[in-house]
Image: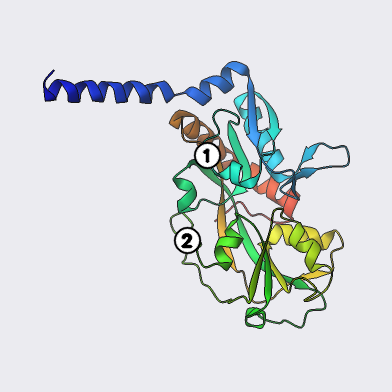
């Protein structure tokens, strides 16, 4: 076999391998009339268990609407965050709907089907805190959820992979960063009092407002957002047809006002527009 023949054979094998992936997830979902969504179980109001132990929240409603438009049933799995955003799902999940930020690192291991809303991150302090500006938090103990963009931000390593966004500005130099495995755990520490365990938390505005609504003695620091990020529906890097199909549905949900309605329902304002 000469070099040209070998090269042609290699190209043929590569094409065959790629075609084997084409439609893999899409075909499975449509054939089974069922879709498995990976999400969170303790991130209100995005996704959480209600008093009946049923999954509810913004991300859950978005998932159900996507399934309805596909004509399939939906079920939910709640892997840890690193698994949700780490790819290599091996067919366990068909989509990830968990308010995931499209970072450059994640783009290497998962596909982004489309942006479905935008989230501002805020600085949250205890209501009795004397802090009036971000500068007042320099040298303080800051809490963030682990493996999230808030952790990347506080460590000055945030790289959002989306066009048209302004550069991230870093105005805070923490004295100590404490990480938490769950989105509500840092608020549980902060509610104990200013400086008891934490001086501030960096978190999505929606999550902070929900904590305050539910009686946490906290307030959002005035002076603007820490940063603002797009959130994407994600899927495993195996099926471009599936990614495109879901992306088209997300665009439909934007155009017909569904995403505007759902963000208003769960967050009290429209977060669907750039």
39 relative position to 88: left or right = right
Which corner quadrant holds the C terminus? bottom right
141 relative position to 113: left or right = right
124 relative position to 188: left or right = left
* Residue 66 image offset from top left, x and y in percent: 62, 33
* Residue 81 image offset from top left, x and y in percent: 63, 46
In the figure, 11 relative to 102: above or below? above
For the point 69% across and 46% down, the residue is: 261
Mark 1 or mark 2, whichever is nearer to me: 1
Q: For the residue labelled by badge 1, is the local secondary structure a helix, a strand or a loop?
A: loop
Q: Would you identify the image quadrant in which residue 150 lies?
A: bottom right
In the figure, 32 relative to 202: above or below? above
Which corner quadrant holds the N terminus? top left
In the figure, 49 relative to 210: above or below? above
Disc 1 versus disc 2: distance between alpha carbons?
25 Å
Q: Nearer the viewer, residue 208 or 21?
A: 21
Query: How many numbered tags mark residues here?
Result: 2
Check whether the beta carbons of the residues at disc 1 and disc 2 lie within 8 A of each other.
no
For the point 69% across and 76% down, the residue is: 222
In the figure, 36 relative to 272: above or below? above
* Residue 113 image offset from top left, x and y in percent: 51, 40
Find disc 2 in the rendering and name its residue: 165
Q: Which mark is residue 139?
A: none
Q: Looking at the image, tell me whether mark 1 or mark 2 is earlier in sequence order.
A: 1
* Residue 13 image offset from top left, x and y in percent: 29, 21
Find disc 1 in the rendering and name its residue: 87
Q: Are there few (<14), some (14-19), or many (20+) residues within 10 Å of tag 1?
A: many
For the point 50% across and 63% down, the residue is: 157
């Amino acid at each position: 076999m000469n070099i040209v023949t070998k090269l042609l054979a290699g190209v043929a094998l590569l094409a065959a391998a790629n075609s084997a992936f084409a439609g893999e997830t899409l075909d499975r979902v449509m054939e089974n009339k069922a879709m498995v969504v990976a999400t969170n179980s303790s991130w209100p109001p995005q996704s959480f268990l209600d008093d009946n132990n049923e999954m509810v929240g913004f991300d859950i409603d978005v998932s159900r609407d996507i399934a309805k438009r596909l004509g399939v049933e939906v079920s939910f799995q709640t892997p840890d965050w690193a698994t949700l955003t780490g790819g290599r799902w091996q067919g366990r999940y068909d989509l990830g709907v968990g308010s995931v930020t499209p970072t450059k690192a994640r783009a290497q291991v998962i596909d982004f089907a489309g942006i479905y809303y935008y989230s501002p991150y805020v600085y949250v302090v205890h209501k009795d805190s004397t802090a009036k500006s971000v500068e007042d938090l320099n040298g303080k103990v800051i809490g963030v959820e682990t493996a999230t963009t808030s952790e990347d931000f506080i460590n000055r390593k945030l790289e959002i992979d989306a066009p048209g966004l302004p550069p991230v500005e870093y105005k805070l130099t923490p004295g100590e960063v404490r990480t938490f495995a769950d989105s509500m755990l840092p608020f549980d520490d902060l509610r104990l009092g200013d400086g008891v365990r934490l001086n501030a938390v960096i978190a999505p505005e929606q999550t902070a407002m929900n904590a305050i609504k539910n009686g946490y003695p906290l307030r959002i620091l005035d002076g603007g957002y820490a940063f603002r990020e797009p959130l994407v529906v994600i899927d495993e890097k195996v099926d471009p047809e599936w990614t495109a199909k879901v992306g088209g549905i997300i665009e439909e949900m934007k155009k017909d006002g569904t995403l505007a309605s759902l963000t208003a329902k769960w967050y009290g304002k429209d977060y669907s527009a750039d």
